[in-house]
Image: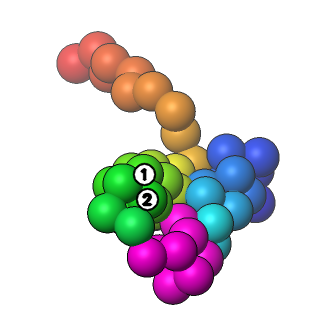
Amino acid sequence: MNKIRIVGVIFLIVGLVLTFFLRHTEVYFFAGILMGLGLLWAITGKTKRTKTRD
C-alpha cells in the first residue's frame, strides 16, 4: 500500500469514529467529508488526475 491509501484508510476510520461517538450535526458534516475523501483515496491511491494522450 502506498502512503495515500494508508492516509485514506485512516481518514475513513476517523470519520466513522467521529460519527459514532459524537452526536452533533456539525460533526456529521465534517465526518462525512473525511469518510468520502478517505474512501476515494483508499480505492484509487491517487491525489490528482492525469491526462492521457491518445
Query: Mark 2: which amino acid?
Result: Val
- For disc 1, the marked residue is 30
Circle 1 Cα neighbour tier, 10 Å, few/some/many (<14 / 14–19 / ≥20): some
Task: State the quadrant of the C terminus.
Answer: top left
Q: Main secondary structure of the magenta part?
A: helix
In the image, residue 4 lies in the stretch drawn in magenta: no
Residue 29's x, y, as percent?
33, 55
Magenta range is 15-23
Quarter of the image holding residue 14?
Answer: bottom right
Residue 42 versus residue 52 in the image, above or below: below
Instruction: Evaluate whether residue 32 shows in this view.
Output: no
Residue 39's x, y, as percent?
45, 62
Query: Mark 1: which amino acid?
Result: Phe
Q: Nearer the viewer, residue 13 or 29?
A: 29
Q: How is the image coloured?
A: rainbow
Residue 46's x, y, as percent?
53, 39
Residue 23 versus residue 54 in the image, above or below: below
Residue drawn at x 42%, y 51% is: 30
Residue 24 versus residue 8 in the image, above or below: below
Residue drawn at x 32%, y 18% is: 51
Q: Nearer the viewer, residue 30 or 26?
A: 26
Residue 27's disc is 2
Q: Are marks 1 and 2 in contact (CB under 8 Å)?
A: yes
Circle 2 Cα neighbour tier, 10 Å, few/some/many (<14 / 14–19 / ≥20): some
Give the foreground label among 1 and 2.
2
Instruction: Evaluate whether residue 19 shows in this view.
Output: yes
Element class at badge 1: helix
Q: Nearer the viewer, residue 43 or 29?
A: 29
Quarter of the image holding residue 28?
Answer: bottom left
Number of marks in the rendered image: 2
